[in-house]
Image: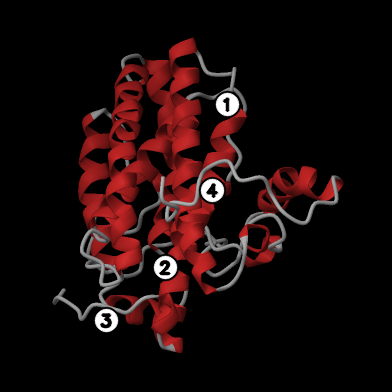
Amino acid sequence: MASAEQLPGPEDLSDDEREAVETLLFRLADDEFVIAERYTEWQVRAPTLESDLALANIAQDELGHARLWYDLLQDFGPDEPDLIWERPAGEWRHSTLTELPFEEGDWADPILRSYLYDVAEEIRLEALVDSSYARIRDRVGKIQGEEDYHREHAENWLERLTEDDEGERRVQQALDRLLPYALTIFAPTDEDIEARIDELGLRTESLADMREEWLDTVVPYLEGLGLSVDEAELPEQYDTHHEGLELPDEIGRDQSHTDDWDDLWDEFTNTYRELDRTEATRIMKDPDEVA
């Protein structure tokens, strides 16, 4: 993708530029926030103390990354309650991979989900390193630095889980269930706006190219562990250039969600509503504040 002209700061963006920036930021922020909320459900339930602490740290990282992206959305007027606690459930744009409930007691589910998500996260962050929008570009390095161990943690556990038949069976079941939803990470929010995101140079790889890179990474790795991607109902296995990859009915990017999303949204906004709050306590400094 050709190098794009650098965009101005938030106050000088045109309406079309602003819409593209906001769409991209909501993709990033909502994914991180929702998957962090799901990870917290595994606290004190992981198979070892070390894995419990690791997943807690990963959840904290993802929540912090979400707030970095939400902070950029606040450049355009909304405050944190508008973006998170008071935003209707039907207006969120995260991939439905992040909202699905975990299979109860099945450690293979969060581990495989983490792997599928973290590989995608690495790819899309790399596509933002040379973003034409400086406010995005300036945040990427910090996030990449905290993402390094997430994938390593998932891979170590996947290799451990697939060492025996029972573990391999459970990971395969998780793969069959989750892989179609993982593809929604690369689904467009709106075809015209996504094209504009690419034309403006907000990211340097298209959704289709990132999806192909992701498949080129995860499929050989998972097959190397003895798992079968064919069982996940990918049509024309394994053809990364195929444009008709089937997605679930609920994609998330287009604000279509599973029934489980309403329950999760209700749960994490409940305290805010019950206490009749109008603002939220900040858990991290504004990244733009001078230390």
Q: Residue at the spot x=49%, y=11% of the render?
A: 49
Please name the residue that numbered disc 1 is placed on.
42
Please name the residue that numbered disc 4 is placed on.
33
* Amino acid type shown at disc 4: Phe
Camera-side mark, 1 or 3: 3
Disc sitting over residue 199 in the figure: 3
Q: CA distance from mark 4 to mark 3?
A: 27 Å
Q: Where 13 sits versus 137, above or below?
A: below
Q: Where 114 sits versus 270, above or below?
A: above
> Where residue 117 appears, x then y in whole percent?
39, 44
Q: Residue at the spot x=38%, y=23% of the render?
A: 168
Q: Residue at the spot x=44%, y=47% of the render?
A: 65
> Where residue 110 appears, x then y in whole percent?
48, 32
Q: CA distance from mark 2 to mark 3?
A: 13 Å
Sequence order check, earlier mark of 4 and 3: 4
For residue 193, what is the image quadrant?
bottom left
For label 3, count other residues whose C-alpha is less than 10 Å away and answer few (under 14), some (14-19) or many (20+). some
Tell whether label 3 touches label 4 (CB within 8 Å).
no
Q: CA distance from mark 2 to mark 4?
A: 15 Å
Q: Where 116 sits versus 8, above or below?
A: above
Sequence order check, earlier mark of 1 and 2: 2
Please name the residue that numbered disc 2 is placed on.
24
Tell whether label 3 touches label 2 (CB within 8 Å).
no
